[in-house]
Image (tube, rainbow, N blue to C red):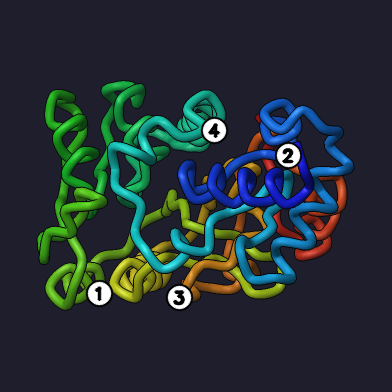
Amino acid sequence: MLVAERLDKIVALVNEKGSIRVTELSKLCEVTEETIRRDLDRLEREGKLQRSHGGAVSIKEQNRETPYFIREVMNTEEKRQIAEAAIRLIEPGERILLDASTTAWYMASILPDIPLTVLTNSIRVATELSMKEKIEVVSTGGTLASRSMSFVGPLAESSLEVYHVDKLFLSAKGVHLTRGISESTELQARIKQKMIQAAERVILLADSSKFGIQAFTRVALLEEVDEVVTDRNISAEILEQLQALECKVTLV
């Protein structure tokens, strides 16, 4: 395969999948991982994709909200493990807030039926928890964002202003060490900003593929996060930088 053909193939694969790892590209293009890294650096300079930790992300996806059914099958094992670790941080009787991420839905699906109050803007989370008798579920209401199956907009934002929760569990489109947490749309960013303001403790659930990505709208700086739950594929460099921010990190 000629270099130009390989570069075109890489761009096509990244755009098709939304994001892809160096290891996968190496196998598909039948070249070394070091060659792929050089290719990705070149393609980023040319504005054809965006580099992320361990791979690349389509620039076409940065300003669009990924549909729920696609997010549901992305990095599923990492998300399940992160959800299991997050549940261990919950105490009976607490008031918690779950966003509309697929990781929050995984949490809801395996959350034991213990006395809790759960506030959420997610239809999927609310539906999952409705079958658990000891858990009181409170929905924000608002305008339905069909791609994420979540409530957003002024009504959802204003409803969050009257609540205070012990812990917030949220995810994001991207996590950048200097630019912070970001989302694909302003509406999603605004609702998560309100969530952070309502929480005593903020716990970020993010698999390693999210790090290094800067999406369209900033939600918050990492200084506003108390704890990060992520997988062991995260680089030692990023782990050290998170710890330098005095952010507790749980690896799964």
Which element is circle 4 on? helix
**How many neighbours does mark 2 have within 10 angstroms: few (below 14), some (14-19), or many (20 or more)?**
many
Marks 1 and 4: in contact by CB < 8 Å?
A: no
Residue 101 lies, in percent from the top left, at: 36, 46
Question: N-terminal of the two: label 1 or label 3?
Answer: 1
Residue 37 lies, in percent from the top left, at: 81, 48
The answer to whether residue 39 is above or below residue 215 is above
Position of the C terminus by quadrant: top right
The answer to whether residue 114 is above or below residue 175 is above
Q: Nearer the viewer, residue 250 or 18?
A: 18
Which element is circle 3 on? strand
> Mark 1 and mark 3: span between their CA atoms?
21 Å
Residue 8 at least partly seen: yes
**Mark in front: 4 vs 3:** 3
> Mark 4 and mark 1: span between their CA atoms?
28 Å
**How many neighbours does mark 1 have within 10 angstroms: few (below 14), some (14-19), or many (20 or more)?**
few
Question: N-terminal of the two: label 4 or label 1?
Answer: 4
> Mark 4 and mark 2: span between their CA atoms?
22 Å
Amino acid, disc 4: Ile
Give the image quarter of residue 196.
Answer: bottom left
The residue identified by callout 2 is 22
Marks 3 and 2: in contact by CB < 8 Å?
A: no
The residue identified by callout 3 is 217
Q: Residue furthest front?
A: 2
Question: N-terminal of the two: label 4 or label 3?
Answer: 4
Residue 165 lies, in percent from the top left, at: 35, 57
> Mark 2 and mark 1: span between their CA atoms?
42 Å
Residue at (71, 61) in percent of width and height: 43
The residue identified by callout 4 is 82
Give the image quarter of residue 82.
Answer: top right
Question: N-terminal of the two: label 4 or label 2?
Answer: 2
The residue identified by callout 1 is 161
